[in-house]
Image (cartoon, rainbow, N blue to C red):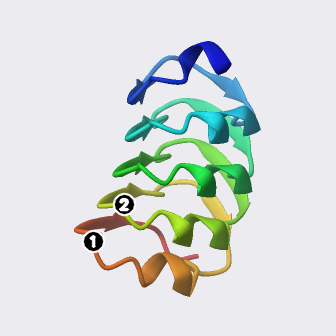
């Protein structure tokens, strides 16, 4: 991931990706857009993504992710647009995420 240190947009939509979201994505300090929707990703959202302080868009919709939405995502103070739906998350959206004042779009499901 060190070779991608200047990457601002990672748009891997509808690519048939499988498996877990790599924790190393949290090392992409300049990333502004992380779009991983419409794949076959499984597992949990890595807490390391809370280190992506420049992120304005985060899209995980239409995968098979499970577990809880990490409270660490509440550290993404530049976040404006978030898509969690549909997946198989447990629990509620963390208060830390709901408290991000710049969010204009938040799509999630209730289970």
Q: Residues within 10 Å of mark 1 (few under 14, many from 20)?
A: some
What is the quadrant of residue 5 in the picture? top right
Q: Is the residue under label 1 in contact with that under label 2 (CB below 8 Å)?
A: yes
Q: Split into 4 quadrants, where in the image is the N terminus?
A: top right
Residue that badge 2 annotates: 79
Q: Nearer the viewer, residue 8 or 58?
A: 8
Camera sees residue 58 = yes
Q: Residues within 10 Å of mark 2 (few under 14, many from 20)?
A: many
Q: Where 58 sits versus 4, above or below?
A: below
Q: Residue at x 62, y 50 (%)?
A: 49
The reply, left or right, for residue 89 in relation to residue 13 is: right
The reply, left or right, for residue 86 in relation to residue 102 is: right
Query: Which residue is outermost to the top?
Result: 3
Camera sees residue 69 = no
Horizontal and vertical percent for residue 97?
49, 75
Horizontal and vertical percent for residue 20?
75, 35
Q: Split into 4 quadrants, where in the image is the C terminus?
A: bottom right
Q: Nearer the viewer, residue 72 or 27?
A: 27
Q: Where 78 sits versus 44, above or below?
A: below
Secondary structure category for the residue under label 1? loop
Secondary structure category for the residue under label 2? loop
First in residue order: circle 2 vs circle 1: 2
Residue that badge 1 annotates: 102
Horizontal and vertical percent for residue 77?
41, 67
């Amino acid at each position: 991931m060190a070779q991608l240190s200047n990457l601002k947009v990672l748009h891997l939509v509808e690519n048939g990706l499988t498996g877990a979201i790599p924790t190393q994505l949290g090392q992409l300090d300049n990333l502004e857009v992380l779009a991983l929707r419409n794949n076959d990703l499984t597992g949990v959202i890595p807490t390391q993504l809370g280190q992506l302080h420049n992120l304005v868009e985060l899209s995980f919709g239409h995968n098979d992710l499970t577990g809880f939405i990490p409270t660490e995502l509440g550290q993404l103070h530049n976040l404006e647009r978030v898509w969690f739906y549909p997946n198989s998350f447990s629990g509620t959206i963390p208060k830390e995420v709901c408290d991000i004042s710049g969010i204009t779009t938040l799509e999630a499901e209730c289970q």
